[in-house]
Image: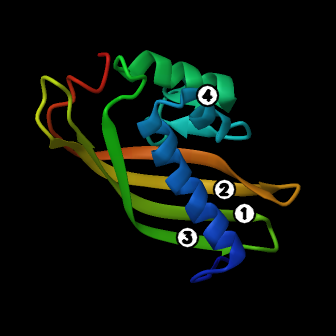
Amino acid sequence: MLLWHTMSDSAREIENLIYTYAERIDAGDLDGLAALFEHGRICGIEDGPPETVFTGSAGVRKMFDMATRLYDDGTPKTKHHTTNVAIYVDEAAGTAQSRSYYCVTQATPQLPLQVIVTGRYHDTFHRIDGVWWFDSRTMFIDQVGDMSHHLKF
């Protein structure tokens, strides 16, 4: 049974993990970003084929290397804004899930500041030796703007 905890220690740790993802991608810290998935995976498509699932730090790093354009300052020149975070923790099982919204803004020398994509994250988490980790992150895209300065494809 999942119980909603407004601000339990676990919920706060998980919330911080969600925000750390945004901070690291915007900083261009792809190694640090990938490390968040040492015990997890990113699913590009819900129930997608195996080639859309990137597992462990190495797999997630490979995904971001393939997809994310970095600029001379080492960053993607983005800001990932994460909101509407709802976290549901099962303390006894050491598992949790969350749903949140994201809005990504970007500005480059050639692209004026604008929203380039919005969507939702559906995340699961597990606790290993007292530490919360991403188990899975599934990304849903709801609205798309000019992504040509963000993605390599």
Question: Residue 133, how many percent across, how many down?
Answer: 70, 51
3 or 4: tag closer to the N-terminus: 4
Query: Of tags 4 and 1, which is closer to the observer?
Result: 4
The amino acid at mark 4 is: Asp
Instruction: Give the residue at mark 3.
Output: 87
Mark 4 and mark 3 in contact (Cβ < 8 Å)? no
What is the quadrant of residue 3 in the picture? bottom right
Instruction: Give the residue at mark 4.
Output: 31
Q: Along the line of sight, which residue is nearer the eye, 81 or 39? A: 81
Cα distance between the residues tagged 2 and 4: 20 Å
Cα distance between the residues tagged 3 and 4: 26 Å
Q: What number is the disc on residue 119?
A: none
- Residue under the point 35% across and 29% down: 76
Q: What number is the disc on residue 125?
A: 2
Quadrant of the drawing holding the C terminus = top left
Mark 1 and mark 2 in contact (Cβ < 8 Å)? yes
- Residue under the point 41% across and 38% down: 26
Question: Residue 142, how many percent across, how many down?
Answer: 24, 49
Residue 123 appears in the figure:
no
Q: Does 45 sit left or right of 113 as displayed?
A: right
Query: Of tags 2 and 4, which is closer to the observer?
Result: 4
The amino acid at mark 2 is: Phe
Q: Does 143 sit left or right of 90 as displayed?
A: left
2 or 4: tag closer to the N-terminus: 4
Instruction: Give the residue at mark 1.
Output: 95
What is the quadrant of residue 70 in the picture? top left
4 or 1: tag closer to the N-terminus: 4
Question: Residue 109, how many percent across, how many down?
Answer: 16, 24
